[in-house]
Every structure is written in C-alpha cells, then in structure tokens.
Image (cartoon, rainbow, N blue to C red):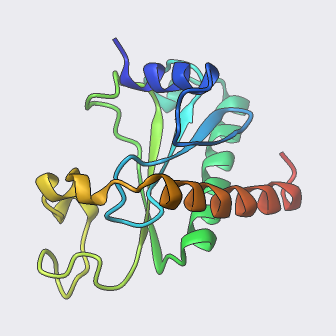
C-alpha cells in the first residue's frame, strides 16, 4: 500500500482538504503539520520510485514544476531559504514526492546553530504534534495564498 497513492486518490475524489492545485506532472498539497509555515508537498501523479525511471522530458517537466512550486511557496510564505527533500524510502511507499520547507530565521531555536540547521533537527514528536496542524481557517488561508502565487508564476513560465 502506498501512502502517497492514497493521498492522490483522495485528491481525485475530492476528499483531500490539503489539496491546492493539479499541475501537469503532480499535485500540490499543504503539509498536514506546519512547524515550518508553508510546508508543502509536490506529489508525482503516477506511482514511480526513482527520478531516473522517468522519461527525460517527463523528468525535466517534473523538476521544472517542482521548482515553480518551491518559488510559489517561498513567495507566499516569506521564506528566507527553501529546503528540498525527495527521499521516498519512508512511509510514502517509495512514491516520488517532494517535501518543500520554507525556512525562516529562528525556526529551530533551541535545536540548531542559532536557530539554523536542517529540518530534521526539529524533534519528530514536536514536528508531528497536534499543535502544528493548521485549523480549517488557517489551512484555507494558506491554500488561497499559495494558489494565487502558483497561478501567477505558471502564467509567467512556459509549461
């Protein structure tokens, strides 16, 4: 069973509240937990496990779209720096999906070097704690601002 495929099925049947936008190669979703405000995922549409398995043109488009999503996340949430992860060996069923973390100064206060460092320095039990889940109003606001940025950028790029 693939967790990402399950999430995509929920998008397709209209029951994924975190869904923001469908693109040519994937789906943009707000992360369930928001310690890093604006944390977003870009889920590849098909169940594939490695970038190098994609046809060259498809891979290039997937990477281009991921970059556009990252730029939109950065703009929407005022990131000082973006962090990118494409791991695929966790509970995602090895399905290609990007984790896009907008970073801000001090977002790791007490856990890194002057509040800076990789996202995984933040304790998992806090990262996935209920207090980091957006409520319905917060989630809708995040989706609205991100969708506006995505649409603006997509119109300025040739994809």
Let me know if residue 70 appears in the view.
Answer: no
Locate residue 137, reporting x and y percent.
52, 58
Q: Residue at x 38, y 46 (%)?
A: 32
Q: 5 above or below 20?
A: above
Question: Image quarter for residue 19?
Answer: top right
Q: 73 above or below 143?
A: below
Question: Image quarter for residue 29?
Answer: top right
Q: Is residue 121 left or right of residue 99?
A: left
Q: Residue at x 25, y 32 (%)?
A: 90
Locate residue 157, reporting x and y percent.
84, 57
Quadrant in which the C terminus is drawn = top right
Let me know if residue 135 appears in the view.
Answer: yes
Instruction: Decide which of 1, 47 is in the foreground and name it.
Output: 1
Q: Residue at x 68, y 47 (%)?
A: 65
Q: Is residue 66 left or right of residue 153?
A: left
Q: 9 above or below 141?
A: above
Instruction: Decide which of 1, 146 is in the foreground and name it.
Output: 146
Q: Is residue 148 left or right of residue 86?
A: right
Question: Image quarter for residue 145?
Answer: bottom right
């Amino acid at each position: 069973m693939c967790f990402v495929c399950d999430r995509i099925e929920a998008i397709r049947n209209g029951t994924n509240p975190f869904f923001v936008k469908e693109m040519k190669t994937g789906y943009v979703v707000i992360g369930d937990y928001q310690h890093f405000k604006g944390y977003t995922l870009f889920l590849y549409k098909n169940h594939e496990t490695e970038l190098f398995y994609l046809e060259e043109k498809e891979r290039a488009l997937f990477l281009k779209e991921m970059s556009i999503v990252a730029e939109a996340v950065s703009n929407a949430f005022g990131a000082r720096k973006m962090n990118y992860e494409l791991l695929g060996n966790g509970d995602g069923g090895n399905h290609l999906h990007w984790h896009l973390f907008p970073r801000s100064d001090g977002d790791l206060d007490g856990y890194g070097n002057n509040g800076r460092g990789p996202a995984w320095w933040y304790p998992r039990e806090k990262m996935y704690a209920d207090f980091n889940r957006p409520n319905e109003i917060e989630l809708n606001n995040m989706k609205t601002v991100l969708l506006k940025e995505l649409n603006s950028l997509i119109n300025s790029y040739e994809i």
